[in-house]
Image (cartoon, helix red, strand yellow):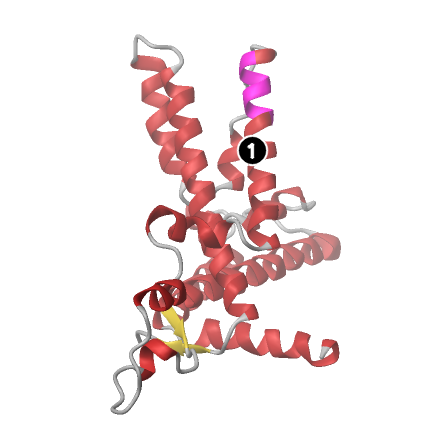
Amino acid sequence: MPSTSQPHRLRRLAVLARDSWLARSYLVVFGVSLVAMFLFPDSPFAAVPLLLTAPLCTVALFLPLDPGSTVEGAADFLALGAVGLWLAVCALVNACVLGAVTTRPATPRTPAASASRPGTETPPRRVMAEQDGPRGLRGVLAPALDNWLARGYLAVVAAALGFFLYAAYVQQDAGFAAIWPVMATAPFSPLALLLAGPAEYYSALPWLGSLILLIGVTLSGLINAVLLGRLARRLHGSEPRPAMG
């Protein structure tokens, strides 16, 4: 029923963030880094919470105060508190994604599972293959395409990539346009940025750096979309069962 679906999904999110050792470890590390950000705002470690909560944390860059700034007055304290609260929400979402990756759903008994019981008829191979789902690359990318959450994220990534390509090849002035697709596809995209920089400045092919960045950002966006899709599937599926930890 609609009145009970929302609390039920919130419970599933809590279970995903709680029943995986990887998600719990991530939340502990984030909590320590968040405390360090408030206690030592001028330290280089003040940016660690941003790295741990990417890509959702990039919204905090549009708030009136960035983490690491000097705080003076009640308004600045409220702004810094808003940043910390948003980072905490981003960390919970990332923890749920990690929980969705490291746990498996407790699915009901299927004909394939009941085939091992004595006295039951073995289902045809075609039925078993249909229940196993698509195989290969199609099966890996399926979570990124079959739900609105992942498709919406891919639309944002496509818009950021389109803006970068327009600035780089139409206006011939990329400037800092590459930062938008990198921010949208963090935390994996900075690796593509590190590889694209030397290729652009030290290679005889001027377009090689942009090509490496484009491929790296696209792959990073697909990975993030798959993770978000698995989280969306878990929210609409059965309760998770810990697979590890």
**Measured from the top left, where is residue 86 in percent x and y?**
61, 58
Name the kind of residue labelled 1 in the image.
Trp
> Which residue was labeled with disc 1?
180
Residue under the point 54% across and 40% down: 184
Q: Residue furthest bottom?
A: 119
Q: Where does residue 117 sit, x and y in percent of width and height?
A: 27, 88
In the picture, measured across the screen, residue 130 lies left or right of residue 232, that is left
Asked if residue 165 lies in the magenta stretch, the reply is yes
Range shown magenta: 163-169
Quadrant for residue 157, please give it. top right
Rendered location of residue 150, percent (x, y): 55, 51
Q: At x 49% / y 47%, what residue is drawn?
A: 42
- Does residue 208 appear left or right of residue 217 in this picture? left
Q: Report the quarter where the C terminus lies.
A: bottom left
In the displayed structure, 152 sits above or below 85; it is above
Whether the magenta-drawn stretch holds residue 204 is answered as no
Q: Residues within 10 Å of mark 1 (few under 14, many from 20)?
A: some
